[in-house]
Amino acid sequence: MSTLPVDNKSPEPPKRSSVVRSAGIVSAAVFASRISGLVRESIMARLFGASQLNDAFVLGFRIPNLTRDLFAEGALSSAFVPTFTRYLTTKSKEEARELSNLVATTLVVIVGVFCVLGMVFSPQLVNLLAPGFHQVPGKFEVAVSLTRIMFPFLLLVALAAQAMGVLNACDQFGVPAMSSTFFNIGSVTCGLVLGYWIGPHIGLQPIFGMAYGVVFGGAMQLFFQVPSLLRQGFSYWPRLSASHPGLRNILRLMGPAILGNASVQINSVINTNFAAGITDAAGHVINGPVSWLSYAFRFMQLPLGLFGVSIASATLPAISRSAAAENIAEFRQTLSRSIAMVMLLTIPSSAGLAVLGESMIAAVYQGGHFSRADTHQTSIALSCYAVGLTGYAALKVLAPAFYALNDARTPMIVSLCSILVNYATANTMIRFAGLGHAGLALSTSAVALFGFFVLLLVMRNRIHGVNGGALLASFLKITTASAAMSAVCGAASHLMLRSLGHSRLGHLATLGVAVPLGAICFYIGCRLLKVAELDAARDAFVAPLLRRFGLGQGPHAKLP
């Protein structure tokens, strides 16, 4: 564990602004990814609804996704990016290239073996996550088959995450962020071709065609990044050396990181187990809770990816360079500004999801096998997930900051403690409060907020402050503006739906009126309250869109 020494170097403004610009680039790419992801989910909703087939598919996809967070976006990215950035900053590019090849080869060996074991023991994994599936004839067996088909996706996405880490460390953010768009496009296209065009001729059911599409999409996500890697001078050659200091440092950081991320997956197992066993008044297991939670969380991925993941992706290389240079002032300033930016963008997003969630879900999902009742139940889960959106997004920024300080132990301990928080909250919500799947979404939010507040307090002591006064002032101002925005959106939604009804057209019209009104209200509120981060957010997230349409250009052009 390492702590940066106290020093009084002032961070350079260009570096701070470059983080915001990079976040804007990632956000634009993530927006395309999340929209394509919603299209993919919409297609799944219309084809399979919240049926037992979709429940089985969601579970089968969730199992490799759980381990993906261990080996890819979670532990690997957090441990790899700071170490690789340190090599780029303090050593030669050749040494950084060797480290990249060592990590990729190690992933092929370790994750490849894990995939084989996962396919062999799929029945045990499905039984662990969803024992309630046995009560519905055929549901358990379908989930096992789908899990086996989709498990190789784990290796592909782990290699894609390592490629993303290399490119981010080289200040290349757009291509890696866009790669998941190609996963969505590839998985849907291949799935539809296999399931509905080729499948009927070879006896392949549509749901299994969609599962093979997931694996194809994972391959597209990886290979889309290869040309950019080659342009940066990082070609792959198999290389193994257990004694390499960089690899050993990554593995040392990954150990606690895997344990910490494992707690997140344990929480998911607990919640999935609860969801799969939710019963009606007669004691019969309900089909739908697993799917409702999955659809709702997918919807929350849009603001989480746009703002949390994009800011985190841009922040980690920057603070890793500050840590390597032992510049605590720059580290503190970059981290606190990033957290403030997360609050500015996610607090109003949370309010918007809570107030307009039902219209959003109806506009995207409702139709075919996805009924109005499914829309209502999914919107309830979305409102409960929205409570923890800011905490969830801030964790994306804050937790990797500890890895930049060479400290993987603190996030691990907090994550392990979150298991108790999650179980206690979920158990209370399900068994005593009787909130069903909504209670499980609330428990997820409680865990996110718990982790954020604890890590923020620890980081405050570690680096001798996080500009807490400024963060608190920003939080209060942003929350006030968001409350006013919620009132405006709620009133507009009520009037529109009362006039047009709850048809899909009515919900689309509601969004077309309420969202712009809410955005204008929030912007005016932040202006009146003088929210410091507003200009930076405008320049990063709004200005590029205006320039694309020929607005705000020229040496003297200014946004309002």
Image: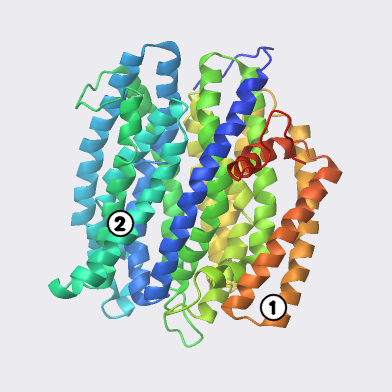
Considering depth in this image, is 298 or 494 the residue closer to the camera? 494
Give how far across and how far down residue 115 sits, in percent.
23, 48
Considering depth in this image, is 3 or 421 the residue closer to the camera? 3
Farthest-out residue, left: 202
Chosen colour scheme: rainbow
With 65 as the anchor, is 313 left or right in this view?
right
Quadrant in which residue 269 is drawn: bottom left
Residue type at tag 2: Val
Q: Can residue 462 be seen?
A: no
With 180 as the anchor, is 555 left or right in this view?
right
Mark 1 to mark 2: distance in Å?
A: 37 Å
Secondary structure of residue under mark 1: helix
Circle 2 sits on which residue? 214
With 560 as the anchor, is 183 left or right in this view?
left
Give how far across and how far down residue 300 sits, in percent.
55, 57
Residue at 42% of width from left, 53% of height from top?
266
Circle 1 sits on which residue? 497
Q: How many marks?
A: 2
Residue type at tag 1: Leu
Vertical comparison of 10 with 247: above or below: above
Vertical comparison of 483 with 9: above or below: below
Sequence-earlier tag: 1 or 2:
2
